[in-house]
Amino acid sequence: MTRSARRAGLAHLIGMTTTTQPQTPLGPVLTLSQLAAQLGVTVQTLYDLRSQGRGPRGFRVGRELRSRVSEVDAWLAQTEADDAQRHPRQAG
């Protein structure tokens, strides 16, 4: 089949549109290993925090636990706020 014949056969597709992005974008995600490396802690520390209800929210893809970067950002902000309340800065 020639190139022009292939083009003619596909010409009806030119006007078609498709949505390639989901309605709610997934956004960037990190594996627990990636997150641990970013934070300078072990993966076990993150598992321990999660089991205590103090870690970032996440979800499993197969065997690997992942967290949305937006969830990690929110968790870090809350952790910082909690720490600031427990240890207020001294005037000086």
Image: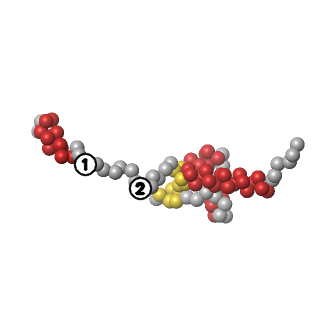
Compared with residue 39, is residue 49 higher up or lower down, i.e. above or below? below
Of residue 15 and residue 31, the one placed in the foreground of this image is 15
The outermost residue toward the front is 15
Figure quadrant of the C terminus:
top right
Is residue 86 among what the camera can see? Answer: yes
Q: Where does the image place residue 83, in percent across and percent down from the top left? A: 75, 54
**Residue 74 coordinates in the image, percent (x, y):** 62, 53
Q: For marks 2 and 1, give the CA distance.
A: 19 Å
In the rendered view, tell whether residue 54 sits above or below residue 19: below
Q: Tell me if residue 15 comes above or below residue 50 in the rendering.
A: above
Judge the density around disc 1: few (<14), some (14-19), many (≥20) Cα neighbours within 10 Å.
Answer: few
What crowding class fits label 2: few (fewer than 14 Cα within 10 Å), some (14-19), or many (20 or more)?
Answer: few
User: For the point 23% across and 46% down, which residue is it?
Assistant: 15
Going 51% across and 56% down the picture, which residue do you hit?
A: 64
Q: Quadrant of residue 51?
A: bottom right
Give 66 or 12, whichever is nearer the viewer. Answer: 12
Q: On the picture, is 5 further left or further right than 75?
A: left
> Which residue was labeled with disc 1?
16
Q: Mark 2 or mark 1, which has the lower sequence index?
A: 1
In the rendered view, would you say 81 is above or below 1? Answer: below
The secondary element bearing badge 2 is classed as loop
Residue 23: assigned label: 2
Amino acid carrying mark 1 in the image? Met
Question: Depth check: 25 or 30 in front?
Answer: 25
